[in-house]
Amino acid sequence: MDSRKSTKLIPLNPILYENFVRRALREDFGRAGDVTTASIIPVDATGEGKIVSRVAGCLAGVELAATAFRLLDPEVSIDIAIRDGSETTAGDVIATVRGSARTLLEGERTALNILGHLSGIATVTHRIVRSIEGSPTRIVCTRKTTPGLRVLEKYAVRAGGGFNHRFGLDDAVLIKENHLAIAGGISEAVRRARAAVGHMVKVEVEVETLTQLEEAIQQEVDAVLLDNMSLQEIREAVKLVSGRVITEVSGGVTPERVPEIAATGVDLISLGWLTHSAPNLDVAFDVSANG
């Protein structure tokens, strides 16, 4: 077994991504399919393609990339050497695809687009998690995801060693500044929320001052989101909370600031940057003909 393989990552069920991959292929095929490949490559030509990492990183989306080829041709053979959640170095062969040369060429771009995007998210997440190695603070993502790709992008965060915040508006109650402006304050907003939701739904409140934090604690919320606070304010907030509720820091968080924020003792640091600004991991597909 590859020693780099993540032991914590739970693979995605194909039902969660097959339709997405199919739509991506359909988008690339357009109205007439791959006219270049169809006009140049014989129907019976076969080949081998190697998905290769051009740089070091952390992988996510390998099975999705493989699915792009399988949807085009169920007879294609795919050997995966490095799986999601594992680190890869420049030049590593991630997977080898064998079969119809037309299938290899038709599925190449869709497979690489998906793998590069998700692995980019996993890679930056992994680097940030590594920057606070040994700390109990967890790195979490947000709802700042590409529309339609939330399940996949949040999976990529998990592949990189991070954790997920809520998936959608129905996961939990998160009372933010604009809610408070309309509801009339923390106490009233929490009271309304508790009266409306079930016992399994957690309640988190965004606070910008220590005074707001004290009020939220008095309302026995499950978590507090410390929004755009200075390091000193965060330290004071953690001391004030004293383990009674979960503390999360958000707002103005950059990868460079994560270690100093984690050192304050907060439970969670959330970064929208993980999913909305992570660069693609550079992966390629090197094809050769058989025979």
Image (spheres, rainbow, N blue to C red):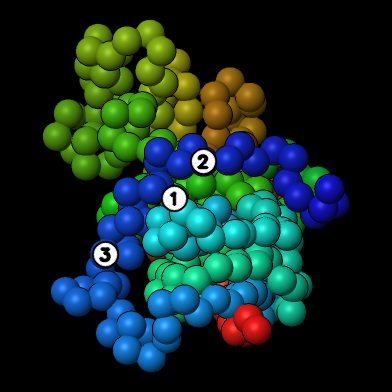
Q: Do the residues labelled 2 and 1 touch (CB within 8 Å)?
A: yes
Q: Splitting the image into 4 quarters, where does residue 89 fall?
A: bottom right
**Amino acid type, label 2:** Leu
**10 Å crowding of disc 2: few (<14), some (14-19), many (20+):** some
Residue 125: tell me if it is visible: no
Q: Residues under labels 3 and 2: Cα distance?
A: 22 Å
Q: In what element is the residue under mark 2?
A: loop
Q: Residues under labels 2 and 1: Cα distance?
A: 9 Å
Mark drawn on residue 26: 3
**How many numbered discs?**
3
Please state which of residues 87 and 260 is positioned toward the viewer in this rendering. 87
- Disc nearest the viewer among 2 and 1: 2
Residue 205 appears at what percent x and percent y? Answer: 38, 31
Whether 51 is drawn above or below 167: the answer is below
**Amino acid type, label 1:** Leu
Query: Is residue 179 rendered to the left or right of residue 6?
Result: left
**Amino acid type, label 3:** Arg
For mark 1, what is the residue?
152
For mark 2, what is the residue?
12
Q: Earlier in the sequence, mark 2 or mark 1?
A: 2
Q: Which residue is drawn at 29% across and 29% down?
A: 170
Whether 71 is drawn above or below 266: the answer is below
Whether 73 is drawn above or below 289: the answer is above
Residue 275 appears at what percent x and percent y? Answer: 45, 59
Query: Is residue 250 rendered to the left or right of residue 282?
Result: left
**10 Å crowding of disc 3: few (<14), some (14-19), many (20+):** few
Residue 287 appears at what percent x and percent y? Answer: 59, 82
Q: Residue at x 38, y 48 (%)?
A: 18
Q: In what element is the residue under mark 3?
A: helix
